Structures are given as structure tokens and as C-alpha cells.
Amino acid sequence: MVRFVQIAMGSGAEPSYHFLLARDLSLMQAAEYDVVDADIGEIMRLLSALSGKLREPAEPRHFELGAKG
């Protein structure tokens, strides 16, 4: 799962560059770029947080045997 998140993060970097290029070539307005860039940034932050959580060692689960009472 971690590997798929890493792939998604790499894939997220590609459109970021393309939108930057589109803005620099005046193919999109700066205000439009700012919105898209903020959205991509948020997605990348979420993927980074997910990657970090997936890498954390799982906490041991403790089960109590016996009847509830």
C-alpha cells in the first residue's frame, strides 16, 4: 500500500508541473492556477500523511480472555 501511495505522489507532481507551465505560457490565468495548485498541494499533503501513517509500526492489540462481567 505504501508503494501505491508513493506512486500516487509521483503522479501528483506531474500535473503540478504541467499547470505551472500552462500558467507561464499564459494558457491559464494566475487565479485559476492558484486554485488548482492549492488543490494539488492539499492532495499531496493528504497522501504524505497517509504514507506516514502506513509506515508507523502497528500498535499491539491486547485482547482479554474470559467472560465479561
Image (cartoon, grey):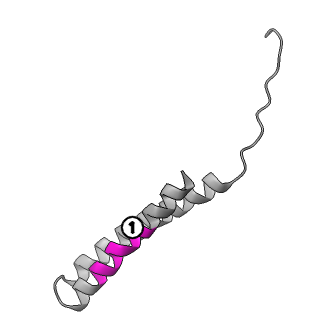
Q: Position of residue 65 (x, y in %)?
A: 83, 16
As drawn, 22 above or below 50:
below
Q: Position of residue 31 (x, y in %)?
A: 24, 80
Residue at 46 percent across and 63 percent down: it is 7
Our reading of the magenta stretch's main secondary structure is: helix
Query: Residue 64: which quarter of the image?
Result: top right
Counting every numbered tag in the picture gives: 1
Q: Would you say residue 16 sits in the magenta stretch?
A: yes
Q: Position of residue 59 (x, y in %)?
A: 75, 43
Residue at 29 percent across and 73 percent down: it is 35
Secondary structure beneath disc 1? helix
Does residue 18 show up? yes
Q: Position of residue 44 (x, y in %)?
A: 45, 66
Residue at 79 percent across and 10 percent down: it is 68
Q: Would you say residue 63 sits in the magenta stretch?
A: no
- As shown in the figure, which amino acid type bears the numbered disc 1? Ser
The reply, left or right, for residue 32 in relation to residue 68 is: left
Residue position marked by numbered label 1 in the rendering:
11
Residue extending furthest left? 27
Q: In the rendered structure, which segment of residues is drawn in magenta?
A: 10-20
As drawn, 52 above or below 33:
above
Query: Residue 28: which quarter of the image?
Result: bottom left
